[in-house]
Amino acid sequence: MRLRATCVPAVAALVVAASSCTGGSAPAVDPGPTGTAGTGATGSQGDPITAKDFDASNFGASATVDNTYFPLEPGMRLVYEGDAMDGKRRVTRRVVMTVTGLTKEILGVPNVVIWERDYTDGELTESELAFFGQDDGGNVWQFGEYPEEYEDGEFVGAVTWLAGLAGARAGLHMMAHPRLGTRSYEQGFAPRPVNWADRGRVYRMGERTCVPTECYRDVLVIEEFDRAERGAFQLKFYAPGVGVVRVGWRGKNEEEQERLLLVKAVRLGPRQLADVHEEALAMEERAYRVSPDVYGQTVPLEVPEP
């Protein structure tokens, strides 16, 4: 169930004001898991599913991702604003996530393609293509990413990982039926030079939170972390039927302390989506040049029929 927002703070005060209307904890250090457990999906041994249960044969021919907590409908655009620490100073952050209508086959699995742009103090710092597929049980997996990094408007590199190439593995992004008390799971893995080893764990369930777009019930909180970085966690708040609506943190060693709130959710029209596809296809063209040993080994993005 969703509740219409009763407080819509100005952008300059988003993070502080939003915590006052959540009816729950602020997106900082939290005391510990609470909430009600749900019914969990199970792996090969009857335990909750983890990344070890990945099997490409469990995926159908469709690229549809309609997981309750992580739905990816082409044309959906979510805009987040907030801030984070950059050394000893706090900087503004803006993230624009767009679900394209493009698909890409990785390990024989059709993936939905997300185009995400990250801005720090108004400047583009990263533009990324990320790939997600949903198995027959409703679990969503991440198959990799191509992240272009920028400094002062100039391209400086793209450390790419894609499942099945250069030792990288697909990871579990969202269980079909998350539940409290389950062990953490690998969200993907890529060895050096990428060093992708993020993990996820159900931190809270049944939360209520308000952001500028709306107030939400039955919110799922996933904590993400790297075992090599003790005492540092990013918290992602997932609302049913929407996806991430809020980002916070906990842990004394969390250096970035990023805080984001969903400020806009829109559905792009055909012409706008066509422009997005043009941008994504241009990125892929660069990816084949920048990452010939990884991205260069993949089949091209597929454009939907008009």
Image: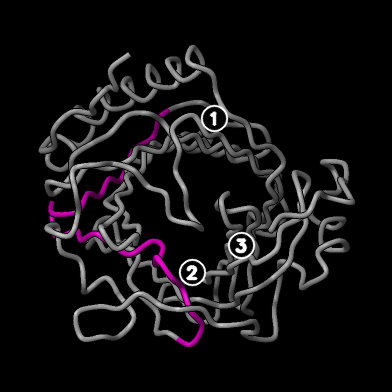
The local secondary structure at tag 2 comes to: strand
Residue 255 at x, y percent in the picture: 60, 67
Quadrant holding the N terminus: bottom right
The span picked out in magenta is: 155-181
Front: mark 2 or 3: 3
Q: Residue furthest front?
A: 1
Q: Residue at point 45% right, 15% down? A: 275
Q: Residue at point 55% right, 75% down? A: 232
Q: Which mark is residue 224?
A: 2
Earlier residue among tags 1 and 2: 1
Front: mark 1 or 3: 3
Quadrant holding the C terminus: top left
Packing grade of label 1 (10 A; few <14, some 14-19, many >=20) is: few
Earlier residue among tags 1 and 3: 1
Near-viewer residue (40 or 124): 40
Packing grade of label 2 (10 A; few <14, some 14-19, many >=20) is: many
Q: Amino acid at mark 2?
A: Glu
Compared to residue 275, the image places residue 77 above or below, namely below
Q: Mark 3 — residue? A: 237
- Left or right: residue 46 compared with residue 55: right
- Left or right: residue 143 compared with residue 165: right
Compared to residue 199, the image places residue 283 above or below, namely above
Q: Mark 1 — residue? A: 152
The local secondary structure at tag 3 comes to: strand
Near-viewer residue (229 or 201): 201
For marks 2 and 3, give the CA distance. Answer: 11 Å
